[in-house]
Each structure stands twice: as structure tokens, then as C-alpha cells.
Image (tube, grey):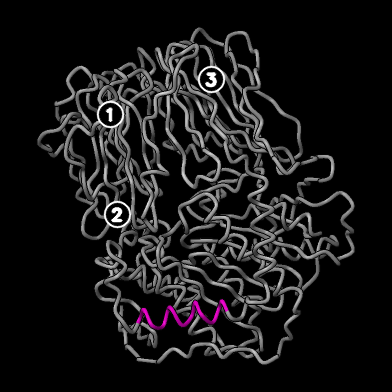
Amino acid sequence: MSLPAPPKARKDPRRIEQLGRVRTDDYAWMKDDNWQQVLRDPKALRADVREHLEAENAYMKAMLASTEELQAQLFAEMKGRIKEDDSSVPAPDGGWEYYVRYELGAEHPVHGRKPRGGGEEQVLIDEDALSKGKAYFHVGGAGHSNDHALYAWAADEQGSEYYTIRVKDLATGEEVAAPIESAYGDFAFSPDSAWIFWIWRDENARPSKVFRRPARGGEDVLVYEEPDDGMFLGVGVTADDSHVVIHVGNQETTESWLIPASDPTAAPVVAEPRRVGVKYSLDHWTDRWVIRTNDDGALDFKLCVSHAEVPAKATWRDWIAHEPGRYITGFLAYEGHLVRAERVNALDRLVVMAREGGEHEIAFDEEAYALNLEGGFEYATTVTRFVYQSPTTPRQWFDYDMASRERTLRKTQEIPSGHDPARYVARRLFATAGDGETVPITVLMLKDTPLDGSAPVLLYGYGSYGHAMEPSFSIRNLSLVDRGWIWATAHIRGGSDKGWGWFLDGRREKKTNTFTDFIACAEHLIDQGYGRKGKIAAYGGSAGGMLMGAVANLRPELWGAIIAAVPFVDVLNTMSDTTLPLTPPEWPEWGNPIEDADAYDRIAGYSPYDQVSAQAYPPILATGGLSDPRVTYWEPAKWVAKLREFQAGDAPILLKINMEAGHGGASGRFDFLKEIALDYAFAIWAIDEGWTRA
């Protein structure tokens, strides 16, 4: 059977001179000059770009036509593992318990509450009803006021991450005022329930100002304006309801501004002025501040306390000292206890500290697992909540009494189609990188999977921004594992899996460690019989998609398939475009190629788009979203066009652009699974086809 011909993108060379260096971009025309408008209204996309993207989608669909039945099977399996009428464990707050639940067949949840101890449900919002008639609908922040009279939610209706915040009077069921437009998905009610603090997103999709508005409607007042385009903003309230906190920061520097709850219209006061390279976060614990920081060389962070009204650095006193290799990832404060979360050698643990002194650890003994603090609304309680899971163990929600140490299982993730953990085995392997570092790998497979290299492997990686890849349970991964695949997660540098130093060793000047670590993981799996060359599917998204592009260029012969979801592959051009939402905030991560020649050369040396060369690439599937503000649609589109131009083998290069979604893909819980089913079907198809290398 003859294969369809791929779209041939026109070449329109654009000469770019920068810092005395010259490059040519043949496919720059794919970036619509009107991209800001496209984010808000995808119909505004230029006609020639739309025609090209639609041709790419048609080619992808034609090439994968033989997998449609497999896609349907994969989707049905994944959906069958979801309890359709599921609900969260209710979270108590005062006289109410709050939760979200799904109805049968619903793509989106209902937010509800009931009187504490039992009673009739009150629906706060019905996301599924609100989403009707919309191609995309996603609720970001949502929450109630302290007096339980108001409920607010932020909704994005195009995937661009421009949110509209609405406030509802729970007594009348009516919205109380005009909605807040062009907002970030983050907001906070003041503890007295009188005000709502929200973040404005500017014309370049950056969060740049914090406003205050009467919670029941009224004029917006500017509270804080961030002068640095390279900073993100957030807003929240301390655990003890004593302060509103404005968070400012990027990957390496943070700052907090405080507003006393007793005077919510007061001007914010900085806690400790920002210093490049110093990160701190804080919470108020009744009579003192607790500060988590990497200051004074605390690479893996420490906890300090301050009894000052404004906790400037001079008032900080070390409390939980820095220990290299013990990465303090966060903490939650309660009236009589504080729980800190730690990670040691890519495994989580929780430590409970009593106000009067003494601490104990909440322990588990699986080889690989994830442990996450969920907390709750209430401060004056001895009960915290955490979630435990592992690659073989579905999620379990525990309420833990910090005083009595009693652990109560509140819910176990139900798998309607059935799940027997005994069928599977999860292992922790360790690869040796080229410089001698030990890189953890988490493996999930059926117990009887042979280790003779015959099993296909999916190797997943990310390795950026300090995000750790936790060994969690996935209803999706089982569809590959049940077919005899081995699922492996590479805990590579650039993440914080082994501490903050693990992150620092995989960014900026050391970014290539991320790529070589991933390759070392693949080679270790091959050496240990878990797979073989040409039967490994590499998978990563966003910055993990950049990883995919890099390893495709570096070692194309290793991979039987590469799936690059919303891939950040046009690194040099993107980091040189100050109009894009994430460019200035991400210079600390990658470097600034506009002003720094070394950064330019370094990025040019690994940027996947710039490093495409004439070699036999494996089958590649790149995906994107038309209204994605994080990784813009033209990145995967340009990359695919250039890969095809230089492809020296016969393996197909495919592109799928969701014309109605952004960075996270489809917004519905089932529609999203269809996109994952396509990814997995592509991997199976590509490995089974065994495309030859020229």
C-alpha cells in the first residue's frame, strides 16, 4: 500500500543577525504576526498558516488510519479505569464540607458542599453545564470565601490561559458583579471575605499587576505592579489567615509582599527584598513566620523562623538546618503542628513537627512511591491529609492525626475495570552518566515480562525547571504495560528528583546533562536487558519535548519512536523574542541570547530546531495547541518541516495541532484521554513497523 505524501512546507528564508552571528530561518513565516489575537480568537489565524496546519493534521490522520481501532481500544481501556461518578474526599471547613464530583459521562466536575455531618448538597458550580457549546473549557482557581457566602472560579474558554473570574452569591445563586476579564487563573479572597485579590494578564499574556476589588463588586484598585518582565506573580493567604501574600519570582529568585488581614486595603510591604539566586517562601504560624529558603548556601533548602512583624532576613533564625541531599520541598502549618515535605534520592517523605517540640516521620516501604501533602482548609486541627501512590498502587487518601499518629484511609482510587497490583512489578534502577553521576530510573512492567531485550520500552523524561518526575500511579500507562511494554521514567538532571543541586546541574551552562542523562538511562536499560536499540519509544512534553528534539539529534538510532508533546524545540528564536509570554521569565533557566554571546552559542549548540541535520531520524510525532501561550504552535510546526527536509531515512515525521486547545490539550477528562491514546497508538505502530534506517 502506498503511503500518502506529507505536506511540503514552503521555504521563505529569513536572515537573522544577532550578536554578530547570522542564522537563516526558512520557516519563520509559520509564526502569525497577529499571534496575540490568535490566542484569544483562534479564528484570527492567517489563512496560509491555517491551510498548512490543516494539511498536516490530515496527513497525520491518513498515516495513522490503520491505528484508529487501536486508538479506540486504548481509549476504552483508559476510560474503563476511571470511576465515572467519582468524587473527592470532602474537605471540612467550619460548618461545611467541600468537594468536587463527576456525574456519569461528564467531562467536567460539579463543585459542591454539604453541611458538616450530613445534609443536602448545594451545587456551587457545575463545570459541565458551563462548558456546553464551548470547544474548550477549563477552570483554574476556584474557592469559597471565609464566611462561606461567596464562591469564585476562574475559567479559560480557549486554552490561551486568559481567565475570566466570576463570583457567585451562594444564598441567591446569582453572580454578584461583572466578571473580571484578562485574569490569571490565581486569586484569593481576603480573610474577612470583603475583597478579592486577582492578577491581570497583559497583552503579551504575562501576569504583571495585582488588583483588589470588593468581593461583591466594585472598582478595581491596583495593589502591586511588577516592573520586571521576567517575574511571575501569585497571590494567597497565610495558613493562620493573618496576611494576604503576593508571591513574586522566577526559577532562581523570589520575593514576598505582605498585607495584614486586619487592614486588607493597606499597601503591601516586602518581607525580604529579592536577591538574585535566593529563593524563599513563607507562612505565618500563629506567633512566628516560617521561611523555607536556599539562602546562605543551603542548596537543598532549610527552614528558618522569624518573630518579627515583617520578617526581613536580619530577623531569620535557622530552625531546621540544611542537610545536603535532603531536599525540603515545602511545608504546611497548623495551629499545633507543622508538616514538612522532603525528598531524598528521588523518594518523598513527610515529617511532622509539634509546636512544643519533637518530630516524627510518616513512613512507607515500597521501592518507588510518591507522597504528596494535600492539607485542607482548617488551621485549628490536628488532622492533615496526604496522598500515597506508587506505579503499582492506586492513589490512597489518608487523614493523619498529627497528635495521636493515627492514620485513617479515607479513599482508594477505584479502578472499575479492575486492577491487581500483584500482576506488576515496580523497580528502581540506577544508570551511570558520562560524568559518573547516578541517575535513577523507575520501571513498571508485568511480573512475567522477559528481560531479554524483546520487550518494547517507553522511556519518559522531562528534566527542567526543577520539576521532579514522581513515581506515581497512572491509569494510562497500564495500557502499554498490559501489552507487554516496559514503562520507564528517567529522573534526569534539570529536575529536582535528587535535590536542588540536581536541578542546577541540568540548566543553563549545564543543560546538556539533561540530554546525556536521558541517553545514559536508555543505554542502561539496554545493558540490563530491559530493551534494545530501535525498540525504545522516547516520550516527553513541553520542556520535555525539547529533550525529545535534542536526543533525536544526538542519538537517532537509539529510538524506535519519539513522541514530542507541545515541544519547546525552537529555543534560540523563542529566547530571543521578548514579546512572547515566557521569554524574560525563562532567561534564568536557559540564558539570554539577546545580550550574552556565550548563552547564544550554548543554546544554538543544542536547540533542536537549529541542530536538525541530514541523518536518519526515527518516526516522530509532534503535537501542539493553536492557542498555547507557553509553547506556541509554530514551534512544532517549524520543527517538523525542517526534520522532513533533512530526513535521510524513510521513517515518517508527523504533526498534530489541536486547533481548539492550548498547552494542556483537550480540556475534558475523556477528550484528553483520546489524545493520549493517539500518542500510545503511534508508539505501538512505529515500533511494530520497524522503519528501516537509511
Q: Position of residue 106 (x, y in %)?
A: 50, 45
Q: In which quarter of the image is the N terminus?
A: bottom right
Q: Which three-letter amino acid code belongs to the residue tagged 3?
A: Thr
Cα distance in 3D space between marks 3 and 2: 35 Å
Tell whether position 52 is magenta. yes
Is residue 77 shown left or right of residue 513?
right
Q: Quadrant of residue 313?
A: top left
Judging depth in this view, the residue of 145 and 386 nearest the camera is 145
Which sits earlier in the primary sequence, circle 3 or circle 2? 2
Region in magenta:
49-61
Q: Quadrant of residue 574?
A: bottom left
Which sits earlier in the primary sequence, circle 3 or circle 1? 1
Residue bearing mark 1: 173
Q: Residue at x 60, y 68 (%)?
A: 563
Q: Residue at x 52, y 29 (%)?
A: 374
Judging depth in this view, the residue of 49 and 240 nearest the camera is 49
Is residue 245 shown left or right of residue 503?
left
Residue bearing mark 2: 230
Residue bearing mark 3: 384
User: Looking at the image, can residue 471 be seen?
Assistant: no
Which sits earlier in the primary sequence, circle 2 or circle 1? 1
Q: Position of residue 114 (x, y in %)?
A: 44, 19
